[in-house]
Amino acid sequence: MFSGIIAGIGSIKQASGRDGGLRLVIEASALDLSDVQPGDSIAVNGICLTVVKKNGGDFTVDVSRETLDCTEGLDAAGAPVNLEKALRPADRLGGHMVSGHVDGVGEVVAFTDLGESWKLVVRAPQVLAKFIAVKGSITINGVSLTINQVDDKKSGASEFSVNLIPHTLLMTNLKNLRAGSRVNLEVDLIARYVERMMQARMEQAEKENNGKEQGK
């Protein structure tokens, strides 16, 4: 479990093929790795990955082909990546509950300088639209952010905007985004569970109604 508060920016030092996936060496000098051991989880651009090796300020992870197919930004050597170690029970939850399991890849529509902050507009896949709400939480490349506006399109896709303060730009790789950039999205964990419970309730109600109809 993570909070979406980025601890440092690293980079993909090396990416090599491994059983259809990739083995990545991540340069993480900005991250305190003193308490990290093989088997620990670190979020890389919002993707929960397992450390298989640590060497000084670097750590190594294996990424499956399935993960590569449904995420963005893990296959380019030299690319900057947002890093966060997994939470401990006593840690502060400064952002929101983040699982590190990417729900979909969005596309940056606009990234505008407002003076005191930057406005980032992202188009989310249609399947995620029902989870995106004004004042709700969303994770972009591992960064916990609050949704300010939502614009549901006739196509079914949803465009939403967030504001980024200078500190967020300084501490994350979001400053490198441009219109057309693809980003990893994780919707609010609680919203997913609420949707699942509502779906189960609707299915139960439908079964009960069908039973009543058949009993007539």
Image: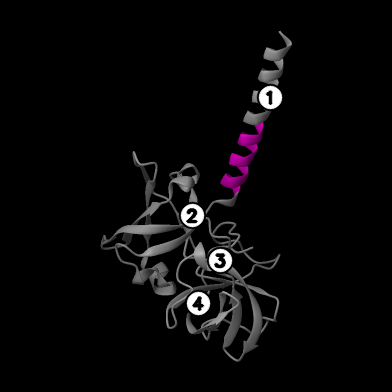
Q: Earlier in the sequence, mark 3 or mark 4?
A: 4
Along the viewing direction, whichever of 115 and 147 lies nearer the viewer: 147
Q: Which range is magenta?
A: 190-201
Task: Residue at 39% x, 49% y: name it.
Answer: 148
Would you name the residue on which mark 4 appears?
Answer: 8
Indicate left or right for 104 with 213 as reference.
left
The stretch drawn in magenta includes residue 197: yes
Q: Is residue 92 left or right of residue 149?
A: right
- Compare marks 4 and 1 and give the one earlier in the sequence: 4
The residue tagged 3 is: 67
Which of the 4 quarters of the picture holds residue 41? Answer: bottom right
Q: Please say if the residues under marks 3 and 1 sit with CB atoms less than 8 Å apart.
A: no
**Disc 3 to disc 1, C-alpha distance:** 36 Å
Type of the residue with mark 1: Lys
* Residue 162 position by quadrant: bottom left
35 to 192, vertically: above or below = below
Q: Position of residue 126 (x, y in %)?
A: 43, 46
The secondary structure type at the circle numbered 4 is strand
Q: Kindly report the distance in space between the C-alpha atoms of the residues bearing marks 3 and 4.
A: 22 Å
The N terminus: image quadrant: bottom right
State the residue position of label 2: 138
The quadrant of the picture occupied by the C terminus is top right
The residues tagged by marks 2 and 1 sit, at their Cα atoms, a distance apart of 34 Å
In this view, which residue lies farthest toward the top? Answer: 216
Q: Which residue is mark 1?
A: 207
